Image (cartoon, rainbow, N blue to C red):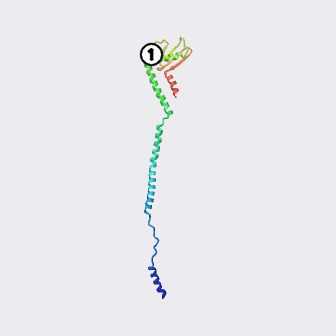
Amino acid sequence: MSEVALAPLSSLWSAMAPRRPAAATPLPDVGAIAAAAETHGRADGRAAAETELEPLRTILSASIGALEAAREIDAAALQPLFVELVTRIASAVIDGELRQSPEVVGRLVEATLAAVTTDGATVIRLSVDDAARMSGDPRVVADPELASGELRVETPQHIVAASLDARLMAILCGLA
């Protein structure tokens, strides 16, 4: 019987004994959670922004490359254009001079005659317009096959063809 009576007393004793505090779960650190969330949010936002900006960066890079290429002057590409421009300007000036001044053709004739030994049988062939301007020289013959500014000096020993265009081309060959 004594055992039976002890059992209820032991349970009473344990009920009255001071309780040991249960292991308390620590409260979460709200500041640390907030900092971690902010860091994670920034990383996600930065990654999303980088993804959206990448095509724009590619376009911008290509545009900058095109701009730099457009700013560079390619002298080799411009030289033929420059020579063509100079040729047209010089041809226009020569044509204007031929129309206004017969002395230009006269100087060309003199320079051509000075290049060859002439005798009494010299014939100077000029275009129809140039021959009309030089009508005082009996050696001048109009040749419809020649263009204005062209001439052909014929002697028994030589035939010399000259033109202002040929002289212009010789100058332009020096530019190229």
| In the rendered image, the vertical position of residue 53 relative to residue 173, given as above or below | below
Residue kind at label 1, given as amino acid type: Arg
Compare residues 108 and 8 and report the one nearer the observer. 8
* Residue 56 % position (x, y): 44, 47
Mark 1, other Cα within 10 Å: few <14 / some 14–19 / many ≥20: some
| In the rendered image, the vertical position of residue 97 relative to residue 75, given as above or below | above
Residue at the disc numbered 1: 133
| In the rendered image, the vertical position of residue 111 relative to residue 24, given as above or below | above
Residue 21 occupies quadrant = bottom left
User: At 52% across and 26% down in the image, what residue appears?
Assistant: 174
Residue that extends furthest to the front in the rendered view of this protein? 18
Q: How many marks?
A: 1
Residue that extends furthest to the right in the rendered view of this protein? 157
User: At 48% across and 39% down in the image, what residue appears?
Assistant: 69
* Residue 129 % position (x, y): 45, 18
Residue that extends furthest to the top in the rendered view of this protein? 120
Compare residues 146 and 151 and report the one nearer the observer. 151
